[in-house]
Image (cartoon, helix red, strand yellow):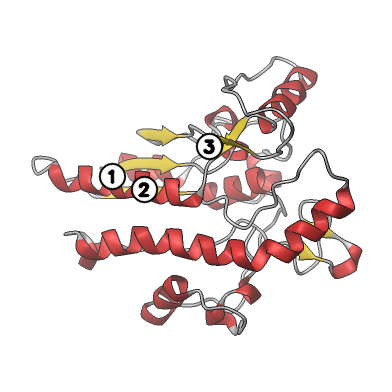
Amino acid sequence: TLRPDYLSTYGFTRHQTENIDKLAKDGTVFDSAYCDVTWTTPSMASTLTGTFCYKHQLRSMYQSLPASAKTVAESLKFAGYNTAAIIGSFPLAAVYKLDQGFDVYDDAFSEAIFVGSHPPQDVENQWGDTVNERKQMFFKKIVNKSRRPDKDVSAIAVRMLEGFSREESNKKPFFLWLHYFGPHDIPDLRLNRLENWKIHAAGYAGKVVDTDKALGDLLSALEASKFRDNTLVIFHADHGESLWEHGFVGHGVYLYEDNL
């Protein structure tokens, strides 16, 4: 849910995203990049498969990636890579079958995407036989443990890097895919839509800074590791976010520039 115009490397001046800036300074920056879907699950499926959603066929929260779709993790695993993923929120949980080709797919969550009056509970990821059952599972999941903080994603990734370093007998290269929930909205069910929009829009910039800090924890560990000289880091977003443009706050509904 990250807009490029809230990163200082793209000219934002109200804050500095120093870790993303460092990646940009040391690497290649794309001035123009578009997603083919403006919400997470199918957009990330497009990313992992290199195909548009009409081809890979994951187009709703009640569909999963077909086994016939080939992911980059499958290709790299076939080429001899260790493959691992650390997921920040439920829309990329293994039930959607984006875990194809990953040796490790960590989709354990600690907090709720939609907060309410009750503490979030552990709810098992279950894929129903019907669309209605899948809808019930989705809405039950997002009001319970369905996301985790970006700093936790980085902490797990750092431990995984340390594990790769200790495996002296294992000379395989690795592919590590991290998903940060980052500047996504976290609606409060006790408030109305307009109140939630105002809170999210006002806090969006701060969330971007928090994600940058979490990324910095990972990049510092990578810099200190033996992998620093031969690891490629690709940093991207799955879609953007409307922040009052067109009288709307959020994503996944429209195909405006701020979402694409």
> Distance from label 2 to label 1 (Cα)?
6 Å
Q: Quadrant of the N terminus?
A: bottom right
Q: Check disc 1 and report the residue beneath it.
A: 159
Q: Secondary structure at mark 3?
A: loop
Q: Is residue 194 above or below residue 164?
A: below
Q: Is residue 229 left or right of residue 115?
A: left
Residue placed furthest toward the left: 169
Which residue appears at 66% of the width and 58% of the height? 239
Q: Which residue is mark 2?
A: 155
How far is mark 3 from mark 2, CA to CA? 22 Å
Residues marked 2 and 1 touching at CB (< 8 Å): yes
Rendering coords of residue 42 (x, y %): 66, 45
Rounded to the nearest whole Å, what is the CA distance between mark 1 and mark 3? Answer: 23 Å
Mark on residue 59? none
- At 57% from the left and 41% from the top, the residue drawn is 89
Q: Residue at x 55, y 31 (%)?
A: 97
Report helix, strand or loop for mark 1. Answer: helix
Q: Is residue 103 left or right of residue 9?
A: left
Residue 24 x %, y %? 44, 77
Answer yes or no: is residue 34 visible: no
Q: Amino acid at mark 3?
A: Leu
Q: Amino acid at mark 1?
A: Arg
Q: Amino acid at mark 2?
A: Ala
Residue 151 vertical placement versus 207 (above, below)? above
Q: Earlier in the sequence, mark 3 or mark 2?
A: 3
* Residue at 71%, 24% in the rendered image: 140
Q: Position of residue 209 (x, y in %)?
A: 54, 67
Q: Which residue is mark 3?
A: 98
Q: Secondary structure at mark 2?
A: helix
